[in-house]
Image (cartoon, helix red, strand yellow):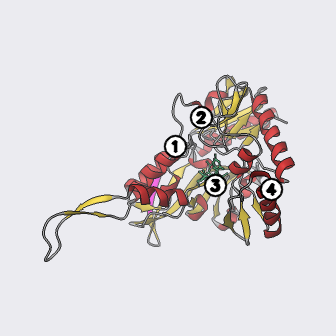
Amino acid sequence: MQVLEHVPLAPLTTLQVGGPARYFAQAATPDDVRQAVDWANLRAVPLFVLGGGSNLVVADSGFPGLVLRIAIGGVERREQDGKQVFEAGAGVEWDALVVQTVAANCAGLECMSGIPGTVGGTPVQNVGAYGQEVSGTIIEVQVLDLRDRQVRSLGHEACGFAYRRSIFNTGERGRFIILRVAYALQPGGAPTIAYRDLKQYFEHNGCPTLVSPGVGETGWGFALKRPTLSDVREAVKEIRLSKAMLIVEGDEDSRSAGSFFKNPALDPADYERLNAAAILLTGSAVPSYPAPARQYKIPAAWLVENAGFHKGYTRGNVGISRKHALAIVNRGGATAAEIIALNHDIQRAVLEKFGIQLTPEPVFVGFE
Ligand code: EPU
């Protein structure tokens, strides 16, 4: 295992801000991971595990310890209880795995097409989009337990999944390094078309197909066929593109960490209070979606916009995406300090106007 020094981290993240890693190594096998952990322990330097860098804000001073980039590859397939299990190395590019599952006509990940990052990051924040979350299919996560340096296998229940949460980013944060993840998918299963944007997409675009004449009929005709997994993948990518949530080289609106804030969930009484304030302040009701435990999920994007940070807002080298109010973007040459300052100002404005404390979604590295 080769340890490099002073390696710039900004190019390894989608937001592209921040300083260098004091030390940097890449791990292609679980054994490399162990070696790297020993290396950091021996020198008493902190360790940070890097995946695809799509949900990170790196401090301008960089990271003072060892940044370990997980490059464990390989996707294995097996049949188990009528499902097709895809077990992927933590370093596999997420969207490459999705492509493979859709091509194999296995349902379960198609709505999470076009998400940047690697497989290893997906259980951490329970990645989700357009009606699916990885918790819906993950059956096993193989980890290196830093308490005793043993490789273990955690089942679905042990991961403690909830909206953008798991044990990996809450109670057991920092304890495990994810090595492999197994997703159990439905062979020949129908795609999930539950999210409003996706339903609307197929209402408008349909899936016209040429059909042959039936018995007693003459002539060919067109009918709407049920969208396939591959149709849903293409639809999701198109929707993400329209929101700059698909990374496109040179598109500064996609130079972001995706959603910068989580969508808050409110109890009915708090929701009523917010709605009354929203009508008073903006003239319209706040959009909401049903959430577990009889709560209401509020789009953070709506709160951000209505607190004064509109799409396309610009301040120095940072701003809000022109296509989605939930993405803080680096307009070119931004510092982490600028990103953090805008983050704080948005949080303050939303708190003052609507009484809601927004929680950032990305992981902050090197800020302590
Ligand atoms: N909205 C606005 N302004 C905007 C955009 C959206 O007011 O600029 C409001 C609208 O009311 C809209 C609602 O927000 O109907 C929801 O917007 P959208 O469908 O774009 O979804 P989101 O709630 O903003 C969440 C995830 C995304 C995921 C999409 C689709 C979070 C924090 N974000 O966004 O995930 O792709 O749903 O499922 O839950 C990510 O986590 O990085 C991410 C991109």
Disc number lying in front (3 or 1): 1
| Secondary structure of the residue carrying numbered label 4 | helix
How many other residues sit within 10 Å of disc 3, few (<14), some (14-19) or many (≥20)?
many
Gap in angstroms between the C-alphas marked 3 and 1: 26 Å
Gap in angstroms between the C-alphas marked 1 and 4: 31 Å
Left or right position of 76 against 172: left
Please state the horizontal and vertical placement of residue 281, each as a whole percent of the image: 79, 52
Give the mark nearest the N terminus, 3 or 4. Answer: 3
* Residue type (three-letter) at the residue carrying disc 1: Ser
Give the mark nearest the N terminus, 1 or 4. Answer: 1
| Residue identified by numbered label 1 | 242
How many other residues sit within 10 Å of disc 4, few (<14), some (14-19) or many (≥20)?
few
- Secondary structure that dominates the magenta span: strand
Inspect this view and state whether residue 366 appears: no
* Residue type (three-letter) at the residue carrying disc 2: Asp
Q: Residue at x 67, y 53 (%)?
A: 125
Give the mark nearest the N terminus, 3 or 1. Answer: 3
| Residue identified by numbered label 3 | 123
Left or right position of 52 against 167: left
